[in-house]
Image (cartoon, rainbow, N blue to C red):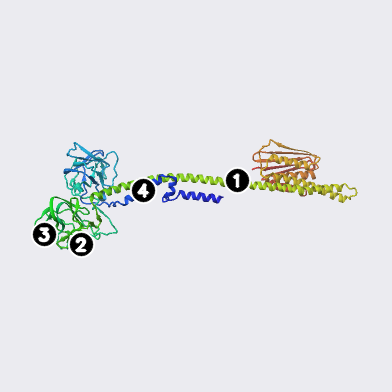
Amino acid sequence: MLSTCRSISLSLLFCAAAPAAQADVWSLLNDQLTAIDHRRGLTSVDLASKPPLPPPQAHEHAGFHSGFSPTADAVRWVQVDLGKEVPVDSIVVIPAYFGATTEGTGAYGWPARFRIDASRDAVFAESVTLFDGTSVDQPSQVAPFVADGKGVTARYVRFSATQLARQPRSQNRYMFCLGEMMIFAAGSNVALHAPVTSTRSTDTPPTWSAEHLVDGWTALGIPAIPEPAHPSGNGWHSGISPVADTAKWVQVDLGGSMPIAEVRLYPAHPPDFPDRPGFGFPRRFRLECSDDATFASSQMIEDHTNAEYPNPADNVATFCTAPHQARYVRLTATQLWQRNDDFVFALAEMEVLSSGKNMAIGMPVTFLDETNTGSWNRTRLVDGEVAQGRLVEPLSWHQKLAERVKLEEELVKLEAERSAALAVAHERALWIGGTLLTFALATALAMMQRGRQERRRELEALRQRIARDLHDEVGSHLGSISLASELALRQQDLGEETRQALDEMQRSAKQAAESMRGILWLVREGGEPSLLRLMQALRESAAAQLHGVDWELQVKEPVADRTASLEFHRHVFLFFKEAMHNIARHARATEVRMVAEWDEHNFDLRIEDNGAGFDARRKGDGSGLANMQHRAEALRGRMELATVPGRGTTITLNAQLA
């Protein structure tokens, strides 16, 4: 039964320490876990459909930096002039990232609280609030923040910081920084290169400038989704030149003349040049469009032949065009990019947008010269892929990244809820387990108690049976022996020697019967009899042995309910019986006085007679004293003897009850 209890307790402890994977078990103890795990599952599935958040990259154009304030609660704002009223679909704000100087891993200068408003007028006399985060701190993370434009028609969009960030390594200087602000209307970023105004700004080119807020450069890089199962190529690569100042061109045939709204140039970043983003992007170039494949006549989209164009690294170089109608788009590099000791011109992808659609995808590509390898060839320029993965629309990409951040925050929240719910389940499991264990132990103890009671009843029955057998068999035989010897002694013609033998036989039979009565009393009592019951047995023994003697057994102020072990009773009874036997046979006493007293811990018995006494120093006069001394020691007590020849004997027993 004890092994069963141990098994139950170990099983319960194992359940209480089971891992979180046993959700179905714990849900039985807290049904909230089922709902939480269901939400976690849906959130995890949704999260898996979102593109991974790319590691932030520091680049030359960090973004916009506000003026400083001595307090954090000063209001600072920056606004973008779209040039005309447009229906705003979405606003994407990307935090600034300042590389190794950024404290922690969060965004640099991201304000804790802010709002975004749209208006038709520059002073915002009337405006519509698109997002209000002025009452709750916003998380600081290098990830897109996307606000719904609600289709509001506006020309100006203002970002107002109401809780500034502390400048790193300073005490009383507060500011806010933004990496990029994109405003989407009809699928296009209409904020690109738009005029920017602010309350105050800290311009430290080339890192911080109001113009960098709308230059298309962000810390998140190119909007591409990695596809490990479908490795992408590097793009298109010109022939290699020993000098930088040489012209090389590449062009795309759109298949027909069409209105061109935007051209996007994606810099290459081949895996074999991991530390050189913006691989092959020309230092000087011009971007043109034409209906003539030879570009005998053309329209200029962007001209950077007279000044170096900053290398965009892993950012898209986007150029919005005036209303142009053309079939061909050509990029001519007039100063090449230095690779090692040579110079090249390379691009990962070219997109030409017309009516919001990339018309260059899969179209024919021509060039002055090229380097054709497995990763570099003309088709790679218009395949919709870069080395980082498959290209996606910027707005969709930023929205999904923002959704990923919210889903990750939701998962963290759900994990906290699950931990709390699991703790409740653990408490209930421990309570139930403890209850079951207590019940099991109580049941086991009850069964053990029942078993002990059953064995006690069996022993009691055996004791009574032995007592009856002794009384019926041995007692009957002793009585027969005593009666037979008594009848024999009545005969007159017995010799003296025979008469003495019969007399000894009768006396021995009576003594044996007396001893058996004492043994029968001990056997019948069992357990822990009371000391008052012992006194009754001592009186019966004295009455049986002290014939013709004036005797008295006095009990002083007894503790009525005091009990002692059966072993204690046996030793005291046999000690007393031996004393009575010695008095009856040797003392020739006429008076015997006995006193017994006890308390919670000690028991005292004094036996005093007025008999012949003896010399205790003579070994021959032991008279069973050795047996009495042995029983006193067995009782963890002592026996004291006082005797003088002719003046009686006093025996005292001091024993411990507990």
Q: From this view, report whether residue 188 is shown above or below residue 227.
A: above
Which residue matches tag 4? 40
| First in sequence: mark 2 vs mark 1 | 2
| First in sequence: mark 2 vs mark 4 | 4
2 vs 1, front mark: 2
Which residue matches tag 3? 294
Q: Secondary structure at mark 4?
A: helix
Mark 2: amino acid = Asn
| First in sequence: mark 3 vs mark 1 | 3
Give residue 377's mark.
2
Which residue is most to the right? 493
Q: CA distance from mark 2 to mark 3?
A: 21 Å
Question: Around disc 1, counting alpha carbons within 10 Å, would you say few (fewer than 14), some (14 to 19), or many (20 or more)?
Answer: few
Provide residue 284's location: percent of width, then percent of height.
14, 56
Q: CA distance from mark 3 to mark 1?
A: 109 Å
Which residue matches tag 1? 449
Mark 4: amino acid = Arg
| First in sequence: mark 1 vs mark 4 | 4
Q: Residue at x 86, y 47 (%)?
A: 487
